[in-house]
Image (cartoon, rainbow, N blue to C red):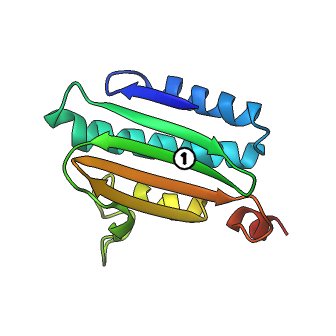
C-alpha cells in the first residue's frame, strides 16, 4: 500500500487506511496497534514541524509486507532531520517538562529497526518489524 498524505487531512483517515491494509495482509492486531501509534507520532511531527514552512506538504507512507518483515516507509520533502538521533531531554521529569518531545522514542521501542536517510531534499524513514522469532514483539509475547 502506498498512500499520499496531505498535511490538512485527518490523522484518523491515515490510521484507518494503514490498519485496514495491515489487517488485509494478515498482520497481528498488536502490530496493527503499534503501526497506528507510530503513524500518529510521525503525522503529528510532520504537521507541527514541517507543514508550517510548507503548507502544501504531501508525504508518502508505504506499508510493505515481505516474507520475513513488515516495513513502514515514510518519505517527505523538507530540511534534514534524523529522528533516529533524537535524545530524551536530560534531567526533566515527566511532570516538569514541556509537552511533546517524547514520541520519537516510541518508534524504536515499538519496532525492531528504525533507519533514516536524507537525499536530494527527501527525508526517508524505514521502520521495520521482523516477522520471525527474533522480533521484539515475539520476545515480549513469550
Residue at 34%, 69% in the rendered image? 85
- In the foreground, 115 or 92: 115
- Label 1 CA crowd tier, 10 Å (few <14, some 14–19, many 20+): many
Which quarter of the figure is the C terminus placed in? bottom right
Residue at 31%, 52% in the rendered image? 99
Residue at 19%, 50% in the rendered image? 79
Residue 65 in the figure: left or right of residue 72: right
**Tag 1, which secondary structure?**
strand
Residue sitting farthest toward the bottom? 91
Residue 105 appears in the rendering: no
In the rendered image, residue 26, in percent from the top left (x then y), is placed at 79, 39
Residue 23: which quarter of the image? top right
- In the foreground, 129 or 2: 2
Residue 27: which quarter of the image? top right
- In the foreground, 76 or 83: 76
Which quarter of the figure is the N terminus placed in? top right
Residue 67 in the figure: left or right of residue 36: right
Residue position marked by numbered label 1 in the rendering: 72
In the rendered image, residue 61, in percent from the top left (x then y), is placed at 47, 37
Amino acid at each position: 500500500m502506498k498512500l499520499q498524505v496531505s498535511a490538512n487531512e485527518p490523522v484518523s483517515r491515515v490510521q484507518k487506511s494503514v490498519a485496514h491494509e495491515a489487517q488485509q495482509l494478515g498482520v497481528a492486531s498488536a502490530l496493527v496497534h503499534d503501526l497506528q501509534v507510530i503513524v500518529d507520532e510521525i503525522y503529528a511531527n510532520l504537521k507541527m514541524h514541517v507543514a508550517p514552512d510548507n503548507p502544501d506538504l504531501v508525504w508518502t507512507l508505504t506499508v510493505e509486507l515481505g516474507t520475513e518483515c513488515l516495513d513502514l516507509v515514510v518519505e517527505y520533502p523538507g530540511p534534514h532531520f534524523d529522528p533516529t538521533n533524537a535524545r530524551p531531554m536530560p534531567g526533566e521529569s515527566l511532570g516538569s517538562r514541556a509537552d511533546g518531545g517524547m514520541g520519537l522514542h516510541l518508534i524504536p521501542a515499538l519496532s525492531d529497526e528504525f533507519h533514516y536517510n536524507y537525499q536530494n531534499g527527501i527525508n526517508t524513514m524505514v521502520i521495520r518489524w521482523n516477522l520471525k522469532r527474533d522480533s521484539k514483539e515475539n520476545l515480549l509475547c513469550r
